[in-house]
Amino acid sequence: MRANLFVSFSPGNSLFPQLIELRVIYALTAVISGYLAQLSGLYWLILGIYIALNPLSYLLRQRLVSLPALALLLIVDVLALSYFIYANNGVLSGWVSALLLPAVIGSLSLSRILAWMTTIVAMLCYALLIFIYLLPAAQPHMHLHSSNMNEHMLGMLITFWVSAFLITAFITAQARILREQHQHIMQQQQRQLRDEQIMAVATLTANTAHHIATPLASAQMLVDELDELTEIERHEHQQLLTQQLQRCQHALDTVIQQGKSFDPQKYQRSQVTQWLTQLCDSWWLTHNEVVLERQFDEQLTHCSIEYKDSLNLAIANILDNAARACANNQRAQIILQAQLNQQQLLINIIDNGEGIDDALIDQLGRHFVSGKGYGIGLALANASIEQAGGSVFIRNLTEGVCTEIRLPLIAQENQP
């Protein structure tokens, strides 16, 4: 039995390629701006170091997917951008708003504390650019700067800070909600997988019990009669007892093989009559004391069904129950009818047993009850069929019981 493992969401893994692409855009923009402005060698040295960090970061991407490492990369981007902006006309540069991008990325991918750290660094760098621009030495042609320019710079600073604050506050809140929803979905998926695995183990166990119940009962009856038999009759009973034990071993081997290949998550698709034929043939190999009559609607040859292994075991369990219910008849017989009904597959499994008490019919398949030929196996089978989008209904007939199974069909193929 295989289990699919759900991997938790990692923002570093998902955003790291986009971060590398964004850094390449930063570098290209810095190269073009530096070339047009004919900047000094220090600018190109710092730009070269920044460009060299890109392939290094890519090579170490497996170690840099943690949130602190991603925050460090974003802070480095903020510092590098701040220098490039300073060297290219300072706060009046056309791409000064690029300082908001690391804050946005941090708000999307980092924890709240690390996101605010990245945003605060960007806000401080923007304030430093404003301060440098307002220094008298920075603009010698402007004498002590007019009050209008100071107010304009102060307005730019307030606008940037408010924008960064609102963006970080809103995006971090939305990102937290999305992460919580994602975590909830992951928990639901893991819970569903665990439930299906438990259901698979329970179904396999019930199937095993059904397969070995009849030969064990026969073996017990033979053992009880040994003391009352002659030597010759005892030898014959010993041979019969050996056959019953071999039958138990064969049933266990069959179930072990089913368990090894059983996958509760894997869907299979098959033509309906082909699927039912294989299912009936496989089941009858270990129940050849029962006459199994099959009645398939010709329309089903043009229909397909999608199913899991658990659905096969569920129907096999219902067939086991029917076989046990009519085991005392001299001619135990089961009729399996399959037909197309309102774009659904309708399967009727009819046995010629003694029937079921009316008081138990409503409980069968929904609760674990004690009854002849029915019980935990039917409850597990009902759960598996409902998981497949189907339903089970049981009713008494004049002779025996009819178990009605409805299953959704995937498609109805066109007739040739």
Image (cartoon, rainbow, N blue to C red):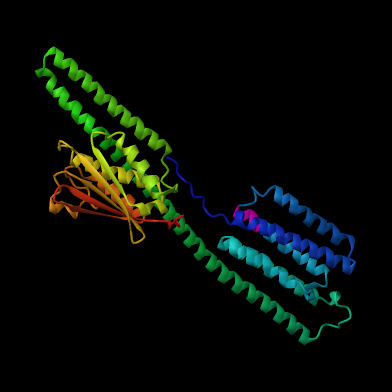
**Considering the image in quadrants, where does the N terminus appear?**
top left
Q: Residue at x 88, y 78 (%)?
A: 140
Instruction: Judge whether 345 appears above or below 354 on screen.
Output: below
Q: Nearer the viewer, residue 203 or 12?
A: 203
User: Would you identify the image quadrant in which residue 188 lies?
Assistant: bottom left
Query: Can you name the residue that lies furthest to the left here?
Result: 228
Q: Is residue 123 visible?
A: yes
Q: Position of residue 57 (x, y in %)?
A: 71, 51
Q: Position of residue 208 (x, y in %)?
A: 30, 36
Query: Can you name the residue that lies furthest to the top here?
Result: 231
The magenta stretch spans residue 39: no
Q: Position of residue 11 (x, y in %)?
A: 58, 57
Left or right for 233, reference 27: left
> Main SS of the magenta segment?
helix
User: Would you identify the image quadrant in which residue 145 lies?
Assistant: bottom right
Segment colored magenta? 66-72
Instruction: Count the numbered circles shown.
Output: 0
User: Would you identify the image quadrant in which residue 249 lies?
Assistant: top left
Q: Nearer the viewer, residue 57 or 300?
A: 300
Q: Is residue 198 visible?
A: no
Instruction: Judge whether 51 appears above or below 220 on screen.
Output: below
Q: Position of residue 327 (x, y in %)?
A: 18, 37
Instruction: Judge whether 81 appears above or below 416 on screen.
Output: below
Q: Nearer the viewer, residue 215 or 126?
A: 215
Q: Residue at x 71, y 47 (%)?
A: 59
